[in-house]
Protein backbone atom coordinates (compact mmCIF):
# COMPACT_ATOMS: atom_id res chain seq x y z
CA UNK A 1 0.00 0.00 0.00
CA UNK A 2 1.64 3.20 -1.21
CA UNK A 3 -0.37 5.30 1.26
CA UNK A 4 1.14 3.51 4.26
CA UNK A 5 4.65 5.10 3.99
CA UNK A 6 3.02 8.49 3.64
CA UNK A 7 0.94 7.92 6.76
CA UNK A 8 4.03 6.78 8.70
CA UNK A 9 5.91 9.89 7.59
CA UNK A 10 2.99 12.07 8.65
CA UNK A 11 2.87 10.35 12.07
CA UNK A 12 6.62 10.85 12.47
CA UNK A 13 6.35 14.53 11.65
CA UNK A 14 3.35 14.89 13.95
CA UNK A 15 5.24 13.18 16.80
CA UNK A 16 8.17 15.50 16.24
CA UNK A 17 5.84 18.45 16.30
CA UNK A 18 4.18 17.27 19.55
CA UNK A 19 7.57 16.82 21.21
CA UNK A 20 8.57 20.25 19.98
CA UNK A 21 5.30 21.71 21.27
CA UNK A 22 6.01 20.33 24.73
CA UNK A 23 9.50 21.77 25.00
CA UNK A 24 9.06 24.95 22.92
CA UNK A 25 12.82 25.43 23.09
CA UNK A 26 14.35 23.77 20.05
CA UNK A 27 14.10 24.98 16.45
CA UNK A 28 11.34 23.36 14.51
CA UNK A 29 12.71 20.60 12.26
CA UNK A 30 9.93 21.45 9.87
CA UNK A 31 11.51 24.82 9.08
CA UNK A 32 15.17 24.30 9.79
CA UNK A 33 17.24 24.08 6.62
CA UNK A 34 20.74 24.73 5.45
CA UNK A 35 21.79 28.24 4.54
CA UNK A 36 21.01 29.51 1.06
CA UNK A 37 18.78 26.54 0.23
CA UNK A 38 16.96 28.01 -2.76
CA UNK A 39 14.28 25.32 -2.74
CA UNK A 40 13.20 26.07 0.83
CA UNK A 41 10.30 28.46 1.28
CA UNK A 42 8.56 28.84 4.64
CA UNK A 43 7.16 32.37 4.34
CA UNK A 44 3.42 32.33 4.90
CA UNK A 45 0.61 34.09 3.16
CA UNK A 46 -1.02 36.56 5.57
CA UNK A 47 -3.26 38.24 3.03
CA UNK A 48 -6.38 36.95 4.85
CA UNK A 49 -5.19 38.74 8.00
CA UNK A 50 -4.54 41.80 5.87
CA UNK A 51 -8.08 41.74 4.46
CA UNK A 52 -9.60 41.35 7.91
CA UNK A 53 -7.65 44.36 9.15
CA UNK A 54 -8.44 46.37 6.01
CA UNK A 55 -12.15 45.72 6.46
CA UNK A 56 -11.98 47.30 9.89
CA UNK A 57 -12.84 44.12 11.68
CA UNK A 58 -9.71 44.23 13.88
CA UNK A 59 -7.14 46.68 15.14
CA UNK A 60 -3.66 46.64 13.63
CA UNK A 61 -2.10 45.61 16.93
CA UNK A 62 -4.25 42.43 16.86
CA UNK A 63 -4.02 41.80 13.12
CA UNK A 64 -1.89 38.67 13.63
CA UNK A 65 -4.05 37.24 16.40
CA UNK A 66 -3.88 33.42 16.39
CA UNK A 67 -1.02 33.44 13.87
CA UNK A 68 1.99 31.12 14.23
CA UNK A 69 4.97 33.18 13.08
CA UNK A 70 7.93 31.51 11.36
CA UNK A 71 10.98 33.60 12.24
CA UNK A 72 14.62 32.93 11.41
CA UNK A 73 16.56 33.55 14.61
CA UNK A 74 20.22 34.40 14.09
CA UNK A 75 22.40 33.03 16.88
CA UNK A 76 24.67 35.57 18.53
CA UNK A 77 25.32 37.07 21.98
CA UNK A 78 21.70 38.18 22.17
CA UNK A 79 20.38 34.61 22.06
CA UNK A 80 20.98 32.06 24.82
CA UNK A 81 21.24 28.89 22.73
CA UNK A 82 22.94 25.87 24.29
CA UNK A 83 22.74 22.18 23.43
CA UNK A 84 20.48 22.95 20.49
CA UNK A 85 17.83 24.79 22.47
CA UNK A 86 16.94 28.19 23.87
CA UNK A 87 17.83 28.81 27.47
CA UNK A 88 15.06 27.65 29.75
CA UNK A 89 15.64 30.24 32.47
CA UNK A 90 16.59 33.08 30.14
CA UNK A 91 16.47 32.66 26.35
CA UNK A 92 18.33 35.86 25.52
CA UNK A 93 17.40 39.43 24.67
CA UNK A 94 15.94 38.98 21.18
CA UNK A 95 13.88 35.96 22.31
CA UNK A 96 12.50 37.97 25.24
CA UNK A 97 11.67 40.91 22.96
CA UNK A 98 9.97 38.53 20.51
CA UNK A 99 8.04 36.93 23.39
CA UNK A 100 6.80 40.36 24.53
CA UNK A 101 5.70 41.35 21.03
CA UNK A 102 3.94 37.98 20.53
CA UNK A 103 2.20 38.33 23.88
CA UNK A 104 0.94 41.80 23.04
CA UNK A 105 -0.09 40.76 19.50
CA UNK A 106 -1.64 37.42 20.56
CA UNK A 107 0.44 35.25 18.20
CA UNK A 108 3.12 32.58 18.78
CA UNK A 109 6.55 31.72 17.42
CA UNK A 110 8.27 29.26 19.78
CA UNK A 111 7.03 26.15 17.92
CA UNK A 112 7.95 27.36 14.47
CA UNK A 113 11.31 29.14 14.48
CA UNK A 114 14.54 28.26 12.74
CA UNK A 115 18.08 29.39 13.51
CA UNK A 116 20.76 31.14 11.45
CA UNK A 117 24.50 31.12 12.07
CA UNK A 118 27.42 33.02 10.55
CA UNK A 119 27.32 33.18 6.75
CA UNK A 120 29.01 30.15 5.22
CA UNK A 121 32.37 30.59 3.51
CA UNK A 122 32.20 32.82 0.49
CA UNK A 123 28.89 34.42 1.48
CA UNK A 124 28.19 37.75 3.18
CA UNK A 125 25.76 39.00 5.80
CA UNK A 126 24.00 40.93 3.07
CA UNK A 127 23.31 37.72 1.18
CA UNK A 128 22.22 35.98 4.39
CA UNK A 129 19.75 38.80 5.11
CA UNK A 130 18.19 38.63 1.65
CA UNK A 131 17.88 34.84 1.71
CA UNK A 132 16.37 34.78 5.23
CA UNK A 133 13.62 37.36 4.53
CA UNK A 134 12.66 35.59 1.30
CA UNK A 135 12.51 32.21 3.05
CA UNK A 136 10.92 33.10 6.45
CA UNK A 137 8.27 35.47 7.71
CA UNK A 138 10.82 37.68 9.48
CA UNK A 139 14.55 37.67 10.12
CA UNK A 140 15.39 38.17 13.81
CA UNK A 141 18.72 39.91 14.24
CA UNK A 142 20.13 43.44 14.58
CA UNK A 143 20.03 44.24 10.90
CA UNK A 144 21.14 47.79 10.12
CA UNK A 145 18.69 49.96 8.25
CA UNK A 146 20.27 51.58 5.20
CA UNK A 147 19.09 53.31 2.06
CA UNK A 148 20.75 50.66 -0.09
CA UNK A 149 18.78 47.89 1.61
CA UNK A 150 15.53 49.78 1.37
CA UNK A 151 16.14 50.19 -2.37
CA UNK A 152 16.39 46.38 -2.68
CA UNK A 153 12.99 45.78 -1.05
CA UNK A 154 14.13 45.05 2.50
CA UNK A 155 11.93 46.67 5.14
CA UNK A 156 12.57 47.15 8.82
CA UNK A 157 10.25 47.48 11.79
CA UNK A 158 11.25 50.06 14.39
CA UNK A 159 14.68 49.24 15.73
CA UNK A 160 15.43 47.80 19.15
CA UNK A 161 19.22 47.92 18.67
CA UNK A 162 21.43 51.03 18.66
CA UNK A 163 23.78 50.35 15.75
CA UNK A 164 25.30 53.83 15.79
CA UNK A 165 28.90 53.55 14.64
CA UNK A 166 31.41 54.49 17.34
CA UNK A 167 35.10 54.03 18.07
CA UNK A 168 36.67 52.08 20.92
CA UNK A 169 40.31 52.22 21.92
CA UNK A 170 42.63 51.60 24.81
CA UNK A 171 42.34 53.97 27.72
CA UNK A 172 44.95 56.71 27.76
CA UNK A 173 45.35 57.17 31.49
CA UNK A 174 47.10 60.26 32.81
CA UNK A 175 50.42 59.68 34.50
CA UNK A 176 49.69 60.01 38.22
CA UNK A 177 53.03 58.66 39.41
CA UNK A 178 54.79 60.90 41.90
CA UNK A 179 57.82 62.76 40.58
CA UNK A 180 59.50 65.00 43.17
CA UNK A 181 61.50 66.75 40.43
CA UNK A 182 58.63 67.57 38.06
CA UNK A 183 58.96 71.28 38.90
CA UNK A 184 62.38 71.22 37.21
CA UNK A 185 61.00 69.93 33.91
CA UNK A 186 60.18 73.32 32.30
CA UNK A 187 63.92 74.01 31.91
CA UNK A 188 66.67 71.69 30.72
CA UNK A 189 69.55 70.81 33.01
CA UNK A 190 71.78 73.16 31.02
CA UNK A 191 69.45 76.11 31.65
CA UNK A 192 69.31 75.36 35.39
CA UNK A 193 73.11 75.26 35.54
CA UNK A 194 73.30 78.62 33.78
CA UNK A 195 70.71 80.09 36.19
CA UNK A 196 72.76 78.94 39.17
CA UNK A 197 75.97 80.23 37.64
CA UNK A 198 74.34 83.59 36.86
CA UNK A 199 73.15 83.99 40.44
CA UNK A 200 76.63 83.27 41.83
CA UNK A 201 78.33 85.48 39.24
CA UNK A 202 75.92 88.36 39.94
CA UNK A 203 76.54 88.11 43.68
CA UNK A 204 80.30 88.28 43.12
CA UNK A 205 79.97 91.26 40.78
CA UNK A 206 77.91 93.24 43.29
CA UNK A 207 80.40 92.35 46.02
CA UNK A 208 83.23 93.66 43.82
CA UNK A 209 81.30 96.89 43.18
CA UNK A 210 80.97 97.34 46.93
CA UNK A 211 84.68 96.78 47.43
CA UNK A 212 85.53 99.24 44.67
CA UNK A 213 83.17 101.82 46.11
CA UNK A 214 81.70 101.10 49.54
CA UNK A 215 78.91 103.57 48.80
CA UNK A 216 77.46 101.35 46.06
CA UNK A 217 74.71 100.12 48.38
CA UNK A 218 73.02 101.62 51.42
CA UNK A 219 74.10 98.57 53.38
CA UNK A 220 77.68 97.52 53.86
CA UNK A 221 77.84 94.39 51.71
CA UNK A 222 81.53 94.46 50.88
CA UNK A 223 82.41 92.20 53.82
CA UNK A 224 79.83 89.49 53.12
CA UNK A 225 80.03 87.69 49.75
CA UNK A 226 77.44 85.07 50.74
CA UNK A 227 74.80 87.75 51.42
CA UNK A 228 75.40 89.21 47.95
CA UNK A 229 74.87 85.79 46.36
CA UNK A 230 71.74 85.28 48.48
CA UNK A 231 70.24 88.59 47.39
CA UNK A 232 70.98 87.68 43.75
CA UNK A 233 69.25 84.32 44.24
CA UNK A 234 66.01 85.67 45.65
CA UNK A 235 65.90 88.14 42.77
CA UNK A 236 65.05 85.10 40.58
CA UNK A 237 61.74 85.06 42.46
CA UNK A 238 61.29 88.74 41.43
CA UNK A 239 62.00 89.88 45.00
CA UNK A 240 64.40 92.87 44.79
CA UNK A 241 66.43 93.58 47.95
CA UNK A 242 69.39 95.56 46.60
CA UNK A 243 69.64 99.31 47.40
CA UNK A 244 72.09 100.72 44.82
CA UNK A 245 73.35 104.29 45.28
CA UNK A 246 75.97 104.60 42.53
CA UNK A 247 75.45 104.66 38.78
CA UNK A 248 77.50 101.49 38.32
CA UNK A 249 75.41 99.63 40.91
CA UNK A 250 72.17 100.90 39.38
CA UNK A 251 73.16 99.78 35.86
CA UNK A 252 74.13 96.34 37.12
CA UNK A 253 70.96 95.81 39.20
CA UNK A 254 68.83 97.00 36.27
CA UNK A 255 70.41 94.35 34.04
CA UNK A 256 70.08 91.71 36.75
CA UNK A 257 66.42 92.58 37.39
CA UNK A 258 65.56 92.39 33.69
CA UNK A 259 67.23 88.98 33.43
CA UNK A 260 65.34 87.73 36.51
CA UNK A 261 62.04 89.02 35.11
CA UNK A 262 62.45 87.16 31.81
CA UNK A 263 63.73 83.97 33.44
CA UNK A 264 60.89 83.85 35.99
CA UNK A 265 58.24 84.61 33.35
CA UNK A 266 59.63 81.92 31.03
CA UNK A 267 59.64 79.38 33.86
CA UNK A 268 56.06 80.20 34.89
CA UNK A 269 54.70 80.02 31.34
CA UNK A 270 56.60 76.85 30.47
CA UNK A 271 55.56 75.17 33.72
CA UNK A 272 51.87 75.78 32.94
CA UNK A 273 52.14 74.49 29.37
CA UNK A 274 54.18 71.50 30.50
CA UNK A 275 51.62 70.45 33.12
CA UNK A 276 48.73 70.83 30.64
CA UNK A 277 50.61 68.72 28.08
CA UNK A 278 51.36 66.13 30.75
CA UNK A 279 47.65 65.73 31.61
CA UNK A 280 46.56 65.47 27.97
CA UNK A 281 46.13 62.02 26.32
CA UNK A 282 49.05 60.90 24.20
CA UNK A 283 46.76 60.41 21.16
CA UNK A 284 43.64 62.52 20.78
CA UNK A 285 41.08 61.06 18.37
CA UNK A 286 37.83 62.97 18.18
CA UNK A 287 36.38 61.33 15.08
CA UNK A 288 36.86 58.54 12.57
CA UNK A 289 38.22 61.19 10.23
CA UNK A 290 40.99 61.93 12.77
CA UNK A 291 41.92 58.25 12.88
CA UNK A 292 42.04 58.07 9.09
CA UNK A 293 44.15 61.23 8.81
CA UNK A 294 46.61 59.79 11.34
CA UNK A 295 46.71 56.60 9.23
CA UNK A 296 45.90 54.46 12.28
CA UNK A 297 45.20 50.74 12.00
CA UNK A 298 41.48 50.03 12.44
CA UNK A 299 39.52 46.86 13.22
CA UNK A 300 35.97 46.32 11.97
CA UNK A 301 33.46 43.46 11.91
CA UNK A 302 33.88 42.33 8.30
CA UNK A 303 30.89 42.03 5.98
CA UNK A 304 28.52 43.96 8.24
CA UNK A 305 26.73 47.21 7.54
CA UNK A 306 29.28 48.92 9.81
CA UNK A 307 32.03 47.71 7.49
CA UNK A 308 30.11 48.86 4.42
CA UNK A 309 29.36 52.29 5.91
CA UNK A 310 33.02 52.85 6.73
CA UNK A 311 34.20 51.57 3.34
CA UNK A 312 31.77 53.79 1.46
CA UNK A 313 33.06 56.82 3.38
CA UNK A 314 36.76 55.93 3.00
CA UNK A 315 36.99 53.64 -0.07
CA UNK A 316 40.77 54.05 -0.47
CA UNK A 317 41.75 53.54 3.14
CA UNK A 318 43.90 50.42 3.45
CA UNK A 319 44.77 50.19 7.16
CA UNK A 320 41.70 48.14 8.04
CA UNK A 321 41.60 44.65 9.55
CA UNK A 322 38.26 42.95 8.94
CA UNK A 323 37.49 40.42 11.66
CA UNK A 324 35.27 37.39 11.19
CA UNK A 325 33.94 37.51 14.76
CA UNK A 326 32.63 40.60 16.53
CA UNK A 327 34.54 39.81 19.73
CA UNK A 328 37.79 39.70 17.74
CA UNK A 329 37.32 43.37 16.85
CA UNK A 330 37.90 44.29 20.51
CA UNK A 331 40.58 41.68 21.07
CA UNK A 332 42.44 43.22 18.14
CA UNK A 333 42.65 46.49 20.07
CA UNK A 334 43.80 44.76 23.26
CA UNK A 335 46.46 42.79 21.36
CA UNK A 336 47.67 45.96 19.59
CA UNK A 337 46.75 44.65 16.15
CA UNK A 338 44.84 47.88 15.70
CA UNK A 339 44.56 51.18 17.53
CA UNK A 340 40.81 51.72 17.11
CA UNK A 341 37.82 49.39 16.86
CA UNK A 342 35.03 50.70 14.61
CA UNK A 343 31.92 49.08 16.04
CA UNK A 344 28.33 49.68 17.15
CA UNK A 345 27.07 51.26 20.35
CA UNK A 346 25.19 48.16 21.61
CA UNK A 347 28.08 45.88 20.71
CA UNK A 348 30.38 47.97 22.92
CA UNK A 349 27.82 48.08 25.73
CA UNK A 350 27.83 44.28 25.73
CA UNK A 351 31.56 43.59 25.35
CA UNK A 352 32.51 46.37 27.76
CA UNK A 353 30.97 44.23 30.48
CA UNK A 354 32.69 40.98 29.45
CA UNK A 355 35.71 40.16 31.62
CA UNK A 356 37.27 37.91 28.97
CA UNK A 357 37.20 40.76 26.43
CA UNK A 358 37.64 43.96 28.45
CA UNK A 359 39.84 42.47 31.15
CA UNK A 360 41.08 45.13 33.54
CA UNK A 361 38.75 47.71 31.97
CA UNK A 362 41.49 48.69 29.53
CA UNK A 363 39.21 49.95 26.76
CA UNK A 364 36.83 52.87 26.45
CA UNK A 365 34.72 54.65 23.86
CA UNK A 366 36.64 57.47 22.22
CA UNK A 367 35.67 60.39 20.04
CA UNK A 368 32.31 61.28 18.56
CA UNK A 369 29.71 58.99 17.02
CA UNK A 370 30.53 58.45 13.36
CA UNK A 371 26.99 57.65 12.20
CA UNK A 372 23.64 57.31 14.00
CA UNK A 373 21.96 54.08 12.94
CA UNK A 374 19.01 52.11 14.27
CA UNK A 375 18.86 48.36 13.73
CA UNK A 376 16.45 45.52 14.38
CA UNK A 377 14.38 42.85 12.65
CA UNK A 378 13.84 42.71 8.89
CA UNK A 379 11.14 41.54 6.50
CA UNK A 380 10.65 41.54 2.74
CA UNK A 381 8.64 44.29 1.10
CA UNK A 382 5.53 42.38 0.02
CA UNK A 383 2.18 44.15 0.14
CA UNK A 384 0.23 41.94 -2.30
CA UNK A 385 1.63 38.47 -3.00
CA UNK A 386 1.97 37.18 0.56
CA UNK A 387 1.21 40.47 2.35
CA UNK A 388 4.36 40.08 4.51
CA UNK A 389 4.45 43.84 5.04
CA UNK A 390 1.58 43.39 7.52
CA UNK A 391 4.01 41.60 9.86
CA UNK A 392 6.29 44.65 9.76
CA UNK A 393 3.38 46.98 10.53
CA UNK A 394 2.20 44.92 13.52
CA UNK A 395 5.73 44.80 14.89
CA UNK A 396 5.97 48.57 14.49
CA UNK A 397 2.93 49.14 16.68
CA UNK A 398 4.16 46.99 19.54
CA UNK A 399 7.81 48.09 19.41
CA UNK A 400 6.71 51.72 19.49
CA UNK A 401 4.55 51.05 22.55
CA UNK A 402 7.41 49.18 24.22
CA UNK A 403 9.60 52.21 23.63
CA UNK A 404 6.97 54.56 25.01
CA UNK A 405 6.26 52.60 28.19
CA UNK A 406 9.95 51.86 28.83
CA UNK A 407 9.61 48.10 28.51
CA UNK A 408 12.21 47.87 25.73
CA UNK A 409 14.75 49.80 27.78
CA UNK A 410 14.03 47.57 30.78
CA UNK A 411 14.58 44.40 28.75
CA UNK A 412 17.90 45.67 27.39
CA UNK A 413 19.07 46.68 30.87
CA UNK A 414 18.06 43.32 32.29
CA UNK A 415 19.99 41.53 29.52
CA UNK A 416 23.15 43.53 30.22
CA UNK A 417 22.83 42.85 33.95
CA UNK A 418 22.37 39.12 33.39
CA UNK A 419 25.23 38.67 30.96
CA UNK A 420 27.89 40.97 32.43
CA UNK A 421 31.01 39.40 33.95
CA UNK A 422 32.73 42.69 34.80
CA UNK A 423 31.63 46.09 36.07
CA UNK A 424 33.74 48.35 33.87
CA UNK A 425 30.66 50.34 32.87
CA UNK A 426 30.32 51.51 36.49
CA UNK A 427 33.65 53.28 36.18
CA UNK A 428 32.29 55.69 33.56
CA UNK A 429 31.17 58.23 36.15
CA UNK A 430 34.60 58.15 37.75
CA UNK A 431 36.23 58.60 34.35
CA UNK A 432 34.04 61.62 33.63
CA UNK A 433 34.99 63.21 36.95
CA UNK A 434 38.66 62.57 36.24
CA UNK A 435 38.31 64.09 32.78
CA UNK A 436 36.64 67.20 34.25
CA UNK A 437 39.46 67.55 36.79
CA UNK A 438 42.26 66.67 34.38
CA UNK A 439 43.45 70.29 34.29
CA UNK A 440 43.78 70.47 38.06
CA UNK A 441 47.30 70.08 39.42
CA UNK A 442 47.67 67.29 41.95
CA UNK A 443 50.51 66.23 44.23
CA UNK A 444 52.05 64.08 41.53
CA UNK A 445 52.80 67.31 39.66
CA UNK A 446 53.44 69.77 42.48
CA UNK A 447 54.55 67.57 45.38
CA UNK A 448 58.23 68.04 44.56
CA UNK A 449 58.03 71.79 45.25
CA UNK A 450 56.69 71.14 48.75
CA UNK A 451 59.34 68.52 49.45
CA UNK A 452 62.03 70.91 48.20
CA UNK A 453 60.81 73.66 50.55
CA UNK A 454 60.43 71.35 53.54
CA UNK A 455 63.86 69.88 52.87
CA UNK A 456 65.54 73.28 52.75
CA UNK A 457 63.68 74.27 55.93
CA UNK A 458 65.14 71.28 57.74
CA UNK A 459 68.60 72.07 56.36
CA UNK A 460 68.26 75.66 57.64
CA UNK A 461 67.32 74.43 61.13
CA UNK A 462 70.26 72.02 61.17
CA UNK A 463 72.69 74.75 60.11
CA UNK A 464 71.37 77.07 62.84
CA UNK A 465 71.79 74.34 65.47
CA UNK A 466 75.31 73.53 64.29
CA UNK A 467 76.33 77.22 64.43
CA UNK A 468 74.84 77.52 67.91
CA UNK A 469 76.67 74.40 69.08
CA UNK A 470 79.99 75.60 67.66
CA UNK A 471 79.51 79.00 69.28
CA UNK A 472 78.91 77.50 72.70
CA UNK A 473 81.84 75.17 72.28
CA UNK A 474 84.08 78.11 71.36
CA UNK A 475 82.88 80.10 74.38
CA UNK A 476 83.52 77.16 76.69
CA UNK A 477 87.13 77.10 75.50
CA UNK A 478 87.94 80.47 77.04
CA UNK A 479 89.32 80.57 80.64
CA UNK A 480 86.58 81.17 83.14
CA UNK A 481 89.14 82.80 85.46
CA UNK A 482 88.48 86.21 86.88
CA UNK A 483 90.65 88.84 88.60
CA UNK A 484 89.07 89.83 91.86
CA UNK A 485 88.60 93.53 92.54
CA UNK A 486 89.46 94.04 96.22
CA UNK A 487 87.44 97.27 96.39
CA UNK A 488 84.33 95.58 94.84
CA UNK A 489 84.07 98.35 92.24
CA UNK A 490 83.58 95.82 89.43
CA UNK A 491 80.29 93.92 89.34
CA UNK A 492 81.94 90.92 87.75
CA UNK A 493 85.37 90.50 89.36
CA UNK A 494 87.96 88.47 87.52
CA UNK A 495 89.99 85.60 88.89
CA UNK A 496 93.27 84.47 87.37
CA UNK A 497 94.48 80.89 87.79
CA UNK A 498 91.81 80.33 90.37
CA UNK A 499 93.59 82.56 92.90
CA UNK A 500 91.64 85.26 94.66
CA UNK A 501 94.28 87.95 94.81
CA UNK A 502 93.67 91.28 96.50
CA UNK A 503 96.06 92.86 94.04
CA UNK A 504 96.76 92.23 90.36
CA UNK A 505 100.24 91.02 89.87
CA UNK A 506 102.18 91.60 86.66
CA UNK A 507 101.74 88.00 85.45
CA UNK A 508 98.02 88.19 86.09
CA UNK A 509 97.82 91.44 84.18
CA UNK A 510 99.45 89.87 81.10
CA UNK A 511 97.12 86.93 81.18
CA UNK A 512 94.08 89.21 81.59
CA UNK A 513 95.22 91.28 78.62
CA UNK A 514 95.49 88.12 76.53
CA UNK A 515 91.98 87.10 77.49
CA UNK A 516 90.70 90.57 76.71
CA UNK A 517 92.31 90.55 73.26
CA UNK A 518 90.70 87.19 72.44
CA UNK A 519 87.32 88.46 73.55
CA UNK A 520 87.60 91.58 71.40
CA UNK A 521 88.69 89.48 68.42
CA UNK A 522 85.74 87.15 68.81
CA UNK A 523 83.38 90.08 69.15
CA UNK A 524 84.39 91.31 65.70
CA UNK A 525 83.57 87.90 64.21
CA UNK A 526 80.12 87.56 65.73
CA UNK A 527 76.99 88.32 63.66
CA UNK A 528 74.57 91.04 64.62
CA UNK A 529 71.84 88.54 65.48
CA UNK A 530 73.92 86.78 68.16
CA UNK A 531 72.73 89.20 70.82
CA UNK A 532 72.95 86.91 73.82
CA UNK A 533 76.57 85.98 73.14
CA UNK A 534 77.59 89.58 72.45
CA UNK A 535 75.99 90.81 75.69
CA UNK A 536 77.78 88.18 77.77
CA UNK A 537 81.15 88.90 76.17
CA UNK A 538 80.65 92.66 76.59
CA UNK A 539 80.21 92.16 80.32
CA UNK A 540 83.43 90.16 80.47
CA UNK A 541 85.33 92.79 78.44
CA UNK A 542 84.08 95.67 80.59
CA UNK A 543 84.92 93.80 83.74
CA UNK A 544 88.48 93.13 82.67
CA UNK A 545 88.96 96.64 81.29
CA UNK A 546 87.85 98.24 84.59
CA UNK A 547 90.08 95.98 86.57
CA UNK A 548 93.12 96.60 84.39
CA UNK A 549 92.55 100.34 84.35
CA UNK A 550 92.46 100.64 88.18
CA UNK A 551 95.36 102.12 90.12
CA UNK A 552 96.82 105.29 91.57
CA UNK A 553 97.84 106.95 88.34
CA UNK A 554 95.79 109.69 86.76
CA UNK A 555 93.00 108.79 84.35
CA UNK A 556 94.93 110.02 81.34
CA UNK A 557 97.98 108.05 82.39
CA UNK A 558 95.85 104.95 83.00
CA UNK A 559 94.12 105.27 79.65
CA UNK A 560 97.43 105.72 77.85
CA UNK A 561 99.03 102.79 79.64
CA UNK A 562 96.04 100.55 79.01
CA UNK A 563 95.83 101.39 75.30
CA UNK A 564 99.53 100.74 74.81
CA UNK A 565 99.29 97.40 76.55
CA UNK A 566 96.21 96.43 74.55
CA UNK A 567 97.88 97.46 71.29
CA UNK A 568 100.81 95.25 72.15
Image (cartoon, rainbow, N blue to C red):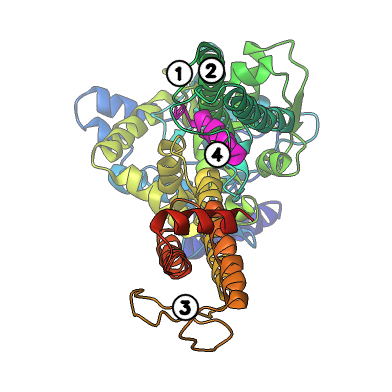
Real-space Cα separation, disc 3 to disc 2, in angstroms: 50 Å
Where are the magenta residues, as a range?
223-242
What residue sits right under mark 1 in the picture?
Answer: 245
Question: Is the Cβ of the residue at disc 1 closer than 8 Å to that at disc 2?
Answer: yes
Q: Position of residue 131 (x, y in %)?
A: 63, 28
Label 4 close to label 2 by CB (< 8 Å): no
Kindly identify which residue carries mark 3.
Answer: 494
| Residue at horizontal 54 percent and vertical 71 percent from the top | 472
Q: Assess whether residue 356 is covered by the magenta stretch.
A: no
Q: Is residue 453 visible?
A: yes
Furthest residue to the right?
122
- Please say if 356 is above or below 238: below
Q: How many marks?
A: 4
- Give the residue displayed 44% in from the left and 71% down from the top: 547
Q: Residues within 10 Å of mark 2 (few under 14, many from 20)?
A: many
Q: Nearer the viewer, residue 419 or 203?
A: 203
Secondary structure type for disc 4: helix
Disc 4/disc 2 C-alpha distance (Å): 16 Å
Quarter residue 490 falls in: bottom left
**Figure check: 449 above or below 152:** below
Q: Secondary structure at mark 3?
A: loop
Amino acid sequence: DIGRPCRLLALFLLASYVIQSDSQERPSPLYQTEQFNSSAFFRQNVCEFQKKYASGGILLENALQGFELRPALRLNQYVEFKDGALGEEYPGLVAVILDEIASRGNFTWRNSYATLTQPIAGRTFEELLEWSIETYDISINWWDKSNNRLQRGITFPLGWYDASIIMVGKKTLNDTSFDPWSWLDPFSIGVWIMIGATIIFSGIVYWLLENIDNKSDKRELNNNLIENIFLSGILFTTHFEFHPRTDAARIFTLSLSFWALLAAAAYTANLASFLVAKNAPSIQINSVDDAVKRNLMLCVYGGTQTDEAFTSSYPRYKNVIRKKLESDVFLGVLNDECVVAVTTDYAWQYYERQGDINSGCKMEQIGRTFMFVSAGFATILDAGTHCTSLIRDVFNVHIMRMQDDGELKTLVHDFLQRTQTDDCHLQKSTSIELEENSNQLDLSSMGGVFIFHFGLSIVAIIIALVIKWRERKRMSGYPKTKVKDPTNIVEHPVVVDGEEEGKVEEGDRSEALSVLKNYIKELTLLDDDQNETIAEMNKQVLSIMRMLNKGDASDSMKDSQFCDELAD
